[in-house]
Structures are given as C-alpha cells and as structure tokens.
Image (spheres, rainbow, N blue to C red):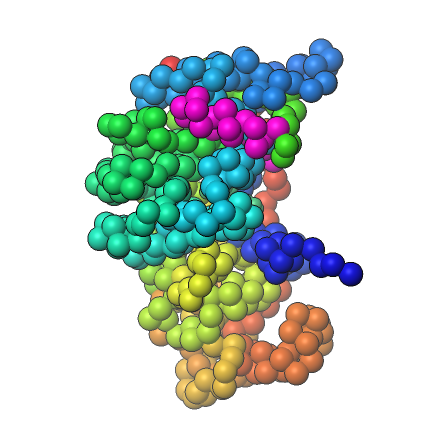
C-alpha cells in the first residue's frame, strides 16, 4: 500500500502537546506551552456570544467579515501608520498558524529558498517543506539571540524567495532591534525577496520599547506580509482568529490558498475580535504591563536561585541557560525531569532548531497568574540544589554533602549553585512504575540511578496549582492605541 506524505509522517507530535500532556499526567504546573491562564476582555466574549445568539452562524465571507477587516486596517493605521485597504489588503484566517501556512503556500514555489531564524516557531519548517520550499536556517546568537548580518548576506541566493521573520520572536523572547530589521529589509531588497513577518506578539514588547513592523520600513510595504493573532492580542489562544495584511497583489494569492485550507473562520469570534480591536486597547496595554511585571518577578526568582536567565524583551517567554550548572544531560531530559519530579513543566529549546541544536537552554512561559508563578518558582535559600543531575550517562560522583530527600536544602530547580551530590534513598514503587512507563524497563533503572534519589521532592513539596480564574470582568479601559 502507498504510504502517506513523508513530510508529516516523519514528524513527531509537537513539543507543546507533548509537554502539556506530560504536565497533565504528573499534575505539574504548566509553564511549557505558551498560553495565558487568565481570560481576555469580558466585553469581547460578550460581543462574540451575542453575535452567535443573533443567528450569525453561516459561512462568513472568505476574506473575513468586513467589520473585522476594517477594524484590522484601523489597528494597523493607528498603531503603526500602515494604511491598508480592508477590501484587498487584509485576509482573516483561522489563527496565525493558518495565516502562515496560507502565506507560505501562496508565496513559495518548489525549489525556492526560505530564510528562517533559529530558534524558530515549530510550524514554519514543515509548512515550507510542504510548499516545496527549502528552509535555509540562520542561527541567532544567545544570550541576546542577535542577528549576524554578515551571515544573512552569505545565505542569500538567487533562489531566496521569502525571508521569514518572527518579531517579537518565540521562543527566543527577542524583540528585534531596528538595525536587525534594517538588515533584513536590505537583504530582501538585494535579492528581491518577500518578507513574511509573524508578529503575533506585536503588543508584548517590554522595557518601554515600541514595536516596529518591518512593513513600516522604507520600501518594505509593497513586499511584506504581516501576520497577527487575536489569540495573543486578547489572551484567547483557543479562538484561533488570525490575519494577514499586505499588498493586494500578495494578499489576493494568500486568500486563494486560505480558501482551500479553512475557507473561513467562525463569524462570532470575528465579531468579538472586531469589537476588541476598536475598543480594548487599554486592556491590551494593561496586559503588556502586567506581563512585564511577571517577567521581572519570575526572572528575579530564578536568578535568586542561581539560574542564568537570558534576556527577554517580549513574548510570554523566559529562557534559562543550563550550561555551567551540574546538569550534564540534555535540555529535553531536564524538562522531563522537572515535570515529573518537581511538578513544573518547561520546553526544551532544542525543539526549535532545524538540526544540531544546542541542548542547554529551556523555556518557561511566564504568562500565568502571580500565584501560579510563585507556586512554580524555586524555593529556599539554596533553591537550585539537588534537582538536576545528568540522567544519563553514567553515575555522577557520590560523596559528602549529599542532600537527602526532603532536606530543606533541596530546591525545585536544577540550575545555578553547586549541586549536592549523593544517592541516598530507594525509589518508591510508584516512581519505578512511572519511569518504566516513560523510559522502558532497562532505561528506567538507569534513569532512576542517574537521576538520583536525593533529588526527588517529597509530594508535599510539589507546587499546588491555584484555582483557575475565569474571564476577567469589567469594561476595557481605553489606552495608548485609542
Ligand atoms: N507564531 C508564533 C510565533 C506563535 O508563538 C504562535 C503560537 N501562539 C503562532 C504563530 C500561532 O498563533 P495562533 O494560535 O493564532 O495560530
Ligand atoms: N505558541 C505556543 C508556544 O509557543 C504554542 C502553540 C501550540 O501549541 N501550537 O508555546
């Protein structure tokens, strides 16, 4: 029998899904998958519900409700001075994921090269390949995840059709600097490439900086597609309402790809988003302020525990560099270990590279209520001790200073200060069973030995998850977009 497409058949399940399920399985606090745990503006939900009850339940227009396209055009004009015609230069999609897929299918011809910047969002490469394109990765350099413009120049070719930028960038937590955007713009002009810019975190730029869309740079308007997402603007990631704005010549082809992907997007959600874009700017400003505080608060907790926290100028994410700690294993094992034994889920950054990834950085989502972040943060004056030793290979040294299970010196995090050594205690039957399920019998024994009993937190030390809040109530204050 013929086999399905190897592009998708060869892929695993996304790291977000994998870590969220693992978090569920171990009742861990989920700082892995990026989603806020508080709802968006109540009035946006009310508008969507009312629209649905009024009977607007049939197919809306292919390019989206005109009211939403107009609201998006007003948003682009108000925030960035970008004039877009709602009839020809805006396409509403089912989330930014579909906006990106439709754009890549619309722009890329078989054999075309698409420049991408690592660490990159996970949907880009599969969709470039599905469109017949060739991803050309360029690595951004930690700790700032800076662009080497020289490297960009060297990777350009006469086959470069698209440069795909993500600003602010997930998972790097990077808000691109103007000089870097300029470098991309001049590269695009040099080889006559189109820039596809994923700007879903456009309103989550911190430290007083303002987001500059690459489309607003000189000469870039006619060759840039800008992607947005209501999921990020209004903290409603499940709504999956996204959009593309750009020149009519490109948007019309994106609309053609979109018509055969999802054709359209639920009308009531579109109506809610349309209202929000016009009226909830104050709410969005407040979201940014609150996320910036959360970044600082959570980052301070990590640093106090000895973790090396990388800078984050935007998005929901903070990265921690495991290098220099006694964790000798891979980031993916660290995340698994943290989830299973310490009750906090994170995402290994290696999942965001095309090949030969660095394996010593993990990503935490700080878009959570303070109580959740506090429950998840490292505790005790000696916070990072004890959690993380190399799970494989081979036994770490034993010796004096071993931290016993439940010792007050035991922290939840495995980064930073010198690690406690030692192997005291025997595994519980439940933990042996769990390891068997996860690693298979042989690996489980090795993993248990290597992980070290000393580091296992007693159940009482596992964080308790505060109750989830519902949709936040109250009228949306008007703010700086208004
Ligand atoms: N791009 C980036 C960089 C993202 O982090 C995400 C996930 N939120 C998306 C696109 C997809 O957005 P949406 O949920 O609107 O499809
Ligand atoms: N954007 C989210 C993140 O980076 C996840 C989206 C998804 O699960 N597909 O964590």
Residue furthest right as drawn:
1
Q: Quadrant of the C terminus?
A: top left
Q: Residue at x 66, y 83 (%)?
A: 442
Query: Which of 135/74 is in front?
Result: 135
Left-right relation of 263 to 315: right
Residue 399 seen: yes
Q: Which residues are magenta?
A: 238-259
Query: Which of 339/300 is in front?
Result: 339
Q: Residue at x 56, y 55 (%)?
A: 15
Q: How many marks?
A: 0
| Residue 462 among magenta residues | no
Q: Quadrant of the N terminus?
A: bottom right
Residue 467 lies in quadrant:
top right
Percent x, y for residue 146? Answer: 27, 51
Q: Residue at x 58, y 16 (%)?
A: 65
| Residue 256 among magenta residues | yes
Residue 146 seen: no
Percent x, y for residue 447? Answer: 58, 78
Percent x, y for residue 182? Answer: 23, 38
Q: Is residue 213 above or below residue 373?
A: above
Q: Residue at x 43, y 87 (%)?
A: 397
Percent x, y for residue 16? Answer: 56, 52
Q: Is residue 401 above or below residue 41?
A: below
Q: Is residue 361 above or below residue 66?
A: below
């Amino acid at each position: 029998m013929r086999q399905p497409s190897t592009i998708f058949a060869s892929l695993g399940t996304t790291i977000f899904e994998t870590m969220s399920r693992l978090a569920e399985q171990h009742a861990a606090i989920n700082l892995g998958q990026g989603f806020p745990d508080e709802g968006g503006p109540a009035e946006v939900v009310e508008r969507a519900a009312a629209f649905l009850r009024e009977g607007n339940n049939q197919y809306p227009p292919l390019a989206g409700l005109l009211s939403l396209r107009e609201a998006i055009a007003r948003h682009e004009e108000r925030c960035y001075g970008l004039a877009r015609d709602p009839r020809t230069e805006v396409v509403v999609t089912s989330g930014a994921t579909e906006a990106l897929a439709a754009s890549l299918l619309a722009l890329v011809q078989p054999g075309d090269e698409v420049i991408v910047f690592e660490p990159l969002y996970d949907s880009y490469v599969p969709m470039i390949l599905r469109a017949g394109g060739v991803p050309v990765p360029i690595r951004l350099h930690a700790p700032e995840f800076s662009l080497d413009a020289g490297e960009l120049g060297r990777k350009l070719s006469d086959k470069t059709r698209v440069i795909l930028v993500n600003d602010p960038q997930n998972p790097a937590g990077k808000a691109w600097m103007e000089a870097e955007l300029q470098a991309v713009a001049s590269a695009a002009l040099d080889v006559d490439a189109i820039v596809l810019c994923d700007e879903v975190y456009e309103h989550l730029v911190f430290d007083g900086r303002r987001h500059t869309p690459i489309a607003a740079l000189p000469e870039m308007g006619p060759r840039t597609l800008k992607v947005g997402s209501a999921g990020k603007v209004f903290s409603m990631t499940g709504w999956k309402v996204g959009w593309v704005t750009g020149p009519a010549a490109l948007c019309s082809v994106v609309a053609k790809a979109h018509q055969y992907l999802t054709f359209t997007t639920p009308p009531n959600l579109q109506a809610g988003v349309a209202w929000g874009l016009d009226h909830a700017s104050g709410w969005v400003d407040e979201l940014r302020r609150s996320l910036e505080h959360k970044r600082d608060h959570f980052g301070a907790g990590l640093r106090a525990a000895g973790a090396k926290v990388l800078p984050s100028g935007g998005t929901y994410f903070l990265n921690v560099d495991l290098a220099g700690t006694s964790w000798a294993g891979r980031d993916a094992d660290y995340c698994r270990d943290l989830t299973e034994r310490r009750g906090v889920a994170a995402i290994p950054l290696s999942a965001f590279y095309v090949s030969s990834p660095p394996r010593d950085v993990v990503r935490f989502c700080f878009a959570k209520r303070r109580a959740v972040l506090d429950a998840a943060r490292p505790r005790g004056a000696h916070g990072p001790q004890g959690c993380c030793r190399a799970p494989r290979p081979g036994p770490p040294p034993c010796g004096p200073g071993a931290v016993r299970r439940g010792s007050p010196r035991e922290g939840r995090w495995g980064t930073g200060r010198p690690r406690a050594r030692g192997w005291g205690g025997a595994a519980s039957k439940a933990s042996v069973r769990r390891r068997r399920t996860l690693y298979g019998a042989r690996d489980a024994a090795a993993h248990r030995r290597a992980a070290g009993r000393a580091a296992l937190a007693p159940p009482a030390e596992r964080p308790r998850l505060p109750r989830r809040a519902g949709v936040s109530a109250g009228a949306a204050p008007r703010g700086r977009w208004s």
